[in-house]
Amino acid sequence: MSNQLKKRVGSSCLFALLALCSTGLQAQLIGAGAGDLPAEQQSRFSDQAEVDKATTNSNTNWQSGRYGPVKNNTARKPGEAIPSFGNHLFSGGFRGVRADDLNADYVVAPGDQVTLRVWGAVEIDRVLPVDAQGNIFIPGVGPIKVQGVRHGELDGRVRNAVSSIYSSNVQVYTNLQGVQPVSVFVTGYVQNPGRFAGTPNDSLLYFLDQAGGIDDATGSYRNVRVVRNGSTIATADLYSFLIEGSLPRPQFRDGDTIVVEERGPTVTVEGDVARPYRYELQPGAMTGQALQELARLKSNVTHVLLRGARSSGPVSSYIDVADFGRQNLQSGDQVVFSSDMRDDTIVVQLEGSYYGPSRFALPRDARLHELLDAIAVPQDMTDVNSVSLKRVSVAERQREALEDSLARLEATYLGASSATNEEAQIRVREAELISKFIERAREVEPNGRLVLASNGQISNIRLQDGDVITIPEKSDSLLISGEVLVPQSVVFSPGRRANDYIQGAGGFTDRADKKRILVVRQNGEVREAADVTLRPGDEILVLPAAPTKNLQLASTLTQILYQIAIAAKVAIDL
């Protein structure tokens, strides 16, 4: 660490946010009470450090405090076809739900049954069917035309008819008790065309679901017709139902036909959109604007890649999203929306012992010392020589290196042949050991810790988006973990060696490798215990011994244990 940096520690002005330092750093702070650094520190970073730019960074994950790429578990597998928008609609959710046929808008039809109760001067209690002429026959009153009458108007129609004969002291109550079942044909581009039973007030989706739904490869979700006696009485665009909840509700009659037409022109959509699907566009609305309204772009989209075929041959264009709305599309086009605007800022986070907010938006070329010189820390409480940094790219490389080592371990030992039965038995035991070890090792999450301190100096590295800078507090304790009987934290005592602390923790376990004792520093550095002098804040980590007489296998396992200890500060049990 520079002399200038140490001086700032003594005056409690080292490191950040309150920034009384002369080497400037203008940064906007993200968090409660955030504000600009003092004016004298703003000469270098001008207007680049905008919080809005940082917060729109697509790599930012505010929940975890890490800003690297976030894994997308819902990503489509390579080679998997893009589904049609609406293909999830028919999964059985409609076929089991029958309509309530007693709603006020239901229109009475022949075959329906009407409950009639009359009391007072005359008493009648009957269930009257609606005959083929559309009438119900009431004794003493005669036929009453009810076909075409809405359910909500039925009681008034019957009451008026009864009152015309029995003018006084008569009370009338009517109710539609049951309706005539209907059978509806479902045909066209559906999974299972056929004739399906239902009620007049069942929805269009009910009958389509009975037929297994629309054929995703050839059927149209935007052109579904209801045909009666050769004429179309209703047309449904299921996109309107999916997006707006709008769906025509014809009252079906026996013999009606639902026809799903052939799919119209389609465009596939991928990239930074809320709904990556294959969309069917209406012939008169083959524009980029119509597609954007369906796909729902994410807020940070800036460009569009359009690929397709025209009469002149294949075409490919990369255009600004503002110009895409006026672009004419054709069936078969592929559209990829993307955020292709490189930020001028990065976001870094602080953790540990410091004053002020925890996040900064900085220029892309900001360096560590510039930030540290602008951070205030608690005087006499901060270990400024143990600053370290966690980086997403480092964690990824650690993970890749560990995975490569595990893959080599599998390839070398799990597939090896045996010359004798005794050797085969040994191989089986080794394979079981290796398999369990690999399973546990793959659960380890590397922390991406980057060691910055060396010989009392802190490297002035360029910061990257997502870096997490750790400024630890001074510690009075020391941790003993791994293969010891009683893992614990104890008060640091100068002059004691690693073995002294291990004995105080109950000694080694039977599985311990007494020659493999590591010391993990607060700055992330990992050293052999025999090579260092212990200091407060250290962790003594006792590795397990490889339970095998195969020296080559034992050496390989020990190497991987070292990798894991460095990457995650843990000792996996063998």
Image (cartoon, rainbow, N blue to C red):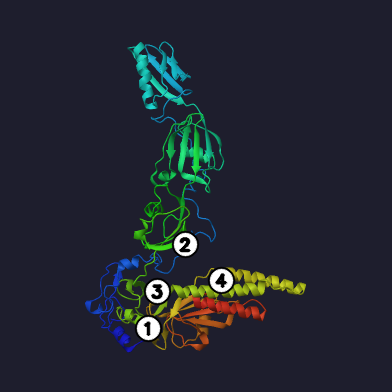
Tell me, yes or no, if residue 207 can be seen here. Answer: yes
Cβ–Cβ under 8 Å for marks 2 and 1: no
| Corner quadrant of residue 344 | bottom left
On screen, 113 above or below 270?
A: above
Quadrant location, the C terminus = bottom right
Q: Nearer the viewer, mark 4 or mark 1?
A: 1
Where residue 331 sits in the image (x, y, percent)?
A: 46, 52
Cβ–Cβ under 8 Å for marks 2 and 4: no
Where residue 159 sits in the image (x, y, percent)?
A: 36, 18
Residue type of the residue flagged with mark 3: Asp
Identify the residue under disc 4.
441
- How busy is the neighbourhood of tag 2: few (under 14 within 10 Å), some, or many (20 plus)? few
Q: Nearer the viewer, mark 3 or mark 2?
A: 2
- First in residue order: circle 4 vs circle 3: 4
Distance from label 2 to label 1 (Cα)?
Answer: 34 Å
User: For the residue labelled by badge 3, is the local secondary structure a helix, a strand or a loop?
Assistant: loop
Identify the residue under disc 1.
460
Residue type of the residue flagged with mark 4: Ala
User: For the residue labelled by badge 4, is the local secondary structure a helix, a strand or a loop?
Assistant: helix
| Corner quadrant of residue 245 | top left
Front-lying residue, 110 or 194: 194
Identify the residue under disc 3.
467
Distance from label 2 to label 4 (Cα)?
Answer: 23 Å
Front-lying residue, 435 or 298: 298
- First in residue order: circle 3 vs circle 1: 1
User: For the residue labelled by badge 2, is the local secondary structure a helix, a strand or a loop?
Assistant: loop
- First in residue order: circle 2 vs circle 4: 2
Residue at the left extreme of this rendering? 39
Identify the residue under disc 2.
72
